[in-house]
Each structure stands twice: as structure tokens, then as C-alpha cells.
């Protein structure tokens, strides 16, 4: 019975050491599987109030850069339901779907491009798909406005590499760019609302808007598709599923678990080792003094 507390202590220590590692590996293994199996199971019809959850934009009507955002007074609801929509992307242009994506949901986007019978693309129904946040959409619209400037590329090349990100637009998380595709399926989930700028009072009221862009022009990226040479019809399906998210402090616990264990576990082992040799006074036994016994035998002999 005395060994039971020791066994429980050993099991608890092993769990503290192994559990964070198991959780990290399970998360890394499960993430690619979830992305690969992403599909859009969207009802055929949209609910009547779906217009409050997304808006369609054309890059030609987006205005000049960030000043367009100051004139946009529309308020979208946080996207928490499925929807589908169709749009036409004209030659040398781009269209976008504006949405408010929030944590707690996984968003799966399914896009299918087809040729317009009235203006068949000479390059085929193949375009580029991007997911952009608010800031990068503004930069994207500005780059479209200045696309005919001959020295724009020279100016960009003249900027230091570490400054180019301040002028160039980037896809969300640097990965959600799908170029030269006729169909595309991908998923995304938000970890937090807003960005580092949200902590500044001036930007506190900015909503986390994102733009799903279908691109039909030569936008200047080296890997993008050239202008389609005609119009493309695009079918967009958006599948929204609730996502179980752990509180943010769980990440800090997992990160700190191993360093803390490296400090606490040796202390516990040392304490248990030092206390092993100590027992109750009742268990103490006197060991005979062998030298005195041997002396006594010698005298008897």
C-alpha cells in the first residue's frame, strides 16, 4: 500500500512530460488531413437575409487605395452561415466578395470558373484566387489603378527588400494565393479578431473584413496568370462550420510545461530520494558493535 502514492506521483510526472508533446504532434498531423478533405456542402438556396453577410466588389469601382475604406459605410454581420453566389469577371479586371470572418468558425471556399459564352476567354477560364485582408485589398486596388504606369516596376525594384512589404500587397498569411486555376477549394480559420493595429484607439472600430478575390488581369506577381482575354463566370460556395477552439492561455501552458517540468521534476525526485532514508523511530534497530564482540571472544578464548 505504501507504493501506491509513489506510483501515482510517477504517473503524474510522466503525463506532465508527455502530454504537451502528444498534443503538439496530434495537432500537426490532423491539420493537413482536415485541409485535404475540405468540401463545400452548401444548400442550393440562400436565406433572404444573406445580403447582410457579404458584398460583391469590382476592382474597377473600388476607388483609390485606403481612401475607399473611409467612404464605405456598409456594416456586414459576422459570417456564421453558408451561402453561394455567382459573378462575372471581365477581361483585365477582378471581382471580390467582402466578408467579416471571425474566430470560432472554419470557412471553406469552393470556386469554379467557366467561360462566358458571349465573351469566350482566349486564355481559357483560368484565373487567380486570393484571400486578402482589408489593408492588402486597398493595396491591391491601388496597384490596379497604377497598372499602366511604366516606371512602377522600376520604383518597386528600387525599394529595399525589407520595405517592399509596406508597398506591395500580400495574400492572407502569405499562403492563400492560388494562381492559374480553373477551380479551387481551400479552408481558413481565424485565430483572433483584428490585428496589432486594433490596439491603437484610432483603428479600434475597424471590422475584420476579408476579400475573396478572383483575378482576371496581369497583377504584377511573377507567378500570376495573364489577362484572360474574355469574361469568366465564377460560382462561389462558402461552407461555414463551427470550430472548437481552445482558450489562448492553453498555448502558454503547453509552451511552459516542459521548462517548468525540467525544474520541478528534479526537485520532486530529490525530495523523494532524501525522504526515503528517513523512517519512524519505531523502525530503528541497533546494529551490534562487531569490534566489541570480537574482543570478547578473544578474551574468552
Image: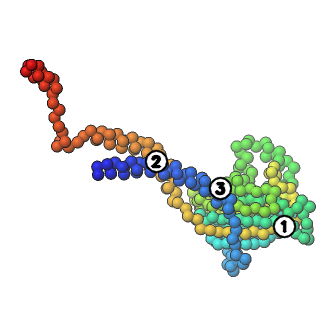
* Viewer-nearest of discs 1 and 3: 3
Query: Residue 262 bears which disc, if any?
Result: none
Residue furthest left in the image: 300
Relative placement, left or right, of 77 versus 222 is left
Of labels 1 and 2, earlier in sequence is 2
Return the x and y of residue 221 as percentages of the image width and height. Answer: 80, 51
* Mark 3 element type: helix
Label 1, on which residue? 114
Image position of 51 with respect to 162: above or below: below
Image position of 264 with respect to 200: above or below: above
Return the x and y of residue 297 as percentages of the image width and height. Answer: 11, 22
The alpha-carbon separation of the residues under discs 3 and 2 comes to 26 Å
The residue drawn where x is 64% and y is 60% is 34
Of labels 1 and 3, earlier in sequence is 3
Return the x and y of residue 145 as percentages of the image width and height. Answer: 82, 58
Label 3, on which residue? 32
Relative placement, left or right, of 116 versus 177 is right
The residue drawn where x is 64% and y is 72% is 81
Label 2, on which residue? 17
Quarter occupied by residue 209: bottom right
Residue 7 seen in render: yes
Image position of 130 with respect to 276: above or below: below
User: Dot 3, how many residues are within 10 Å of its Cα: few (below 14), some (14-19), or many (20+)?
Assistant: few
Relative placement, left or right, of 74 versus 20 is right
Image position of 108 with respect to 298: above or below: below
Quarter occupied by residue 27: bottom right
Relative placement, left or right, of 280 versus 257 is left
User: Dot 1, how many residues are within 10 Å of its Cα: few (below 14), some (14-19), or many (20+)?
Assistant: some
The alpha-carbon separation of the residues under discs 1 and 2 comes to 54 Å
Amino acid at each position: 500500500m505504501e507504493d501506491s502514492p509513489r506510483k501515482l506521483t510517477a504517473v503524474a510526472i510522466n503525463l506532465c512530460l508527455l502530454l504537451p508533446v502528444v498534443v503538439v504532434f496530434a495537432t500537426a498531423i490532423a491539420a493537413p488531413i482536415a485541409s485535404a478533405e475540405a468540401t463545400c456542402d452548401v444548400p442550393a438556396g440562400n436565406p433572404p437575409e444573406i445580403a447582410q453577410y457579404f458584398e460583391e466588389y469590382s476592382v474597377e469601382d473600388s476607388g483609390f487605395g485606403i481612401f475607399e475604406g473611409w467612404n464605405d459605410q456598409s456594416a456586414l454581420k459576422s459570417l456564421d452561415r453558408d451561402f453561394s453566389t455567382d459573378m462575372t469577371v471581365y477581361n483585365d479586371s477582378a471581382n471580390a466578395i467582402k466578408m467579416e470572418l471571425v474566430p470560432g468558425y472554419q470557412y471553406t471556399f469552393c470556386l469554379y470558373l467557366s467561360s462566358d459564352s458571349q465573351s469566350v476567354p482566349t486564355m481559357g477560364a483560368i484565373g487567380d484566387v486570393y484571400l486578402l485582408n482589408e489593408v492588402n485589398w486597398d493595396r491591391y486596388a491601388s496597384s490596379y489603378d497604377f497598372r499602366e504606369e511604366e516606371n512602377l516596376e522600376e520604383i518597386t525594384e528600387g525599394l529595399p527588400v525589407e520595405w517592399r512589404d509596406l508597398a506591395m500587397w500580400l495574400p492572407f498569411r502569405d499562403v492563400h494565393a492560388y494562381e492559374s486555376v480553373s477551380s479551387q477549394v481551400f479552408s481558413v480559420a481565424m485565430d483572433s479578431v483584428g490585428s496589432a493595429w486594433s490596439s491603437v484607439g484610432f483603428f479600434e472600430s475597424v471590422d475584420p473584413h476579408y476579400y475573396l478575390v478572383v483575378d482576371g488581369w496581369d497583377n504584377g506577381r511573377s507567378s500570376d496568370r495573364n489577362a484572360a482575354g474574355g469574361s469568366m463566370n465564377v460560382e462561389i460556395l462558402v461552407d461555414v462550420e463551427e470550430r472548437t477552439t481552445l482558450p489562448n492561455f492553453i498555448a502558454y501552458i503547453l509552451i511552459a510545461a516542459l521548462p517548468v517540468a525540467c525544474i520541478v521534476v528534479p526537485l520532486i525526485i530529490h525530495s523523494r530520494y532524501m525522504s526515503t532514508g528517513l523512517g519512524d523511530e519505531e523502525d530503528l534497530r541497533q546494529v551490534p558493535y562487531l569490534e566489541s564482540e570480537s574482543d570478547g571472544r578473544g578474551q574468552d578464548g
